[in-house]
Amino acid sequence: MTTQQLPIVYSIRGCDACVKLQRKWDAEGVQYEMRYAEDSQELMDEARRYGNVVPIILWPDGRVEEGFEGGIGCYIG
């Protein structure tokens, strides 16, 4: 079993809060794995296990965070 090393971000393209997160983290050099929920039903189902509003951040320690900096993104539920 592998241990997750980077935060995983579930997103959908065009979501304002998701774009803000990506731009900020890219500018700050934060490493993360981006998963676009609309790319497959499997990814959508995976994202929905953690929440119903993207961005959904799955931290390496198991914490789950919905939204970004107080902003709510797009509903996927």
Image: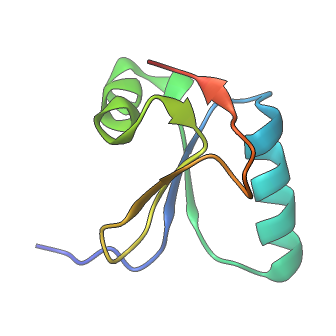
Q: Position of residue 4 (x, y in %)?
A: 32, 73
User: Tell me, what colour scheme is on the image?
Assistant: rainbow
Q: In percent of the image, x 83 and y 35: which residue is there?
A: 16
Q: Quadrant of the C terminus?
A: top left
- Judge left or right: residue 65 versus residue 15: left
- In the picture, residue 41 is in which quadrant? top left
Give the camera-side residue of 66 and 16. Answer: 66
Q: Residue at x 32, y 77 (%)?
A: 61
Q: Is residue 48 above or below residue 59?
A: above
The residue most toward the front is 70
Q: Where is residue 75, by image quadrant?
A: top right
| Count of numbered tags | 0
The residue that appears at 83% across and 80% down in the rendered structure is 28
Q: Would residue 20 be found to the left or right of residue 75 on screen?
A: right
Vertical relation: 34 (above or below) 25:
above
View extreme (left): residue: 1
Q: Residue 67's x, y, as percent?
A: 63, 46
Quadrant where the N terminus is found in the figure: bottom left
Would you say 44 lies left or right of 46 here?
right
- 24 up-or-down from 30: above or below: above
- The quadrant where residue 23 appears: bottom right
User: Viewer-proximal residue, 54 or 44?
Assistant: 54
As rendered, which of 53 and 70 lies closer to the eye?
A: 70
Residue at point 47%, 74% (across, down): 6
x, y (%) of residue 46? 32, 35
Where does the image place residue 33, in percent across and percent down from the top left?
54, 61
From the viewer's perspective, is 25 left or right of 72? right
